[in-house]
Image (cartoon, rainbow, N blue to C red):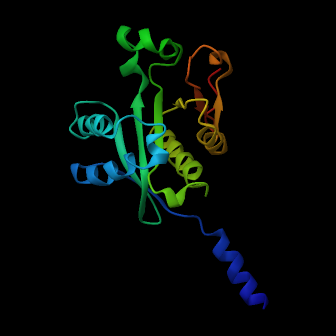
Amino acid sequence: MAQLSAQHSAQNLVQPAYDFRPMTPGDLPLMREWLETPHVREWWGEPETELGYIRDMIEGHDTTRPFIYSVDGEPVGYIQYWFIGDHQNATWIADHPWLAELPADAVGVDLSIGDPEKLAQGVGSATLRAFAERLIRQGHRTIIIDPDPENRRAVRAYEKAGFRAIPRLLGKTGDTLIMQYESNENGPDR
């Protein structure tokens, strides 16, 4: 019995493997399927419009970097990072003045769980933390995420992943909550 208990404990210590693969045109049908699910449609735009944006990213017409993420080899969702400095221009700042309050070398991330079977299992938080740590290893120091504050499920998941609201921006960002990743190496930009 003790050996069985030790084996069970060892199995519980095995961490899932998270993989981030750059998207290709071949991923667009899967992305369309995910964009059409009710839990994604609630917070993302029209699927055809979103696919157009992602197609532009894949083709290099947009600097945002799109990825399919997998957990233990199984594609689960979509994640991307975008460069704040590329959006610190008059057009973007007119609609999103908070962009001017962030360092130009900051990156923003966006995430969605495509597979509805993976909701409410901690997958989003763990994936986001792994992705943020990957970005830190690549040299990024300020990593933000900008959920709708009404999306409480996402806000809780982002907090669990290590993101915190930036106090100096509270109340200044309209229908967006600006949160920054805090790791041991990356203190908050307050």
Q: Name the one closer to the observer, 92 or 63.
A: 92
Give the x, y percent position of residue 53. Answer: 29, 34
Q: Name the one closer to the observer, 38 or 98.
A: 38
- Whether residue 184 is visible, yes or no, is no
171 relative to 53 in the view: left or right: right
Residue 8's image quarter? Answer: bottom right
Q: Quadrant of the N terminus?
A: bottom right
Residue 74's image quarter? Answer: bottom left
Q: Find the residue positioned furthest to the bottom.
A: 1
The answer to whether 76 is drawn above or below residue 103 in the figure is below
135 relative to 54 in the view: left or right: right
Give the x, y percent position of residue 39. Answer: 49, 47
Q: Name the one closer to the observer, 148 or 98.
A: 148
The answer to whether 41 is drawn above or below residue 96 in the figure is below
Give the x, y percent position of residue 50. Answer: 33, 36
Residue located at (79% from left, 88% from top): 2
Q: Find the residue positioned furthest to the front.
A: 38
Residue located at (27% from left, 53% from top): 29
- Whether residue 34 is visible, yes or no, is yes
The answer to whether 183 is drawn above or below residue 7 in the figure is above
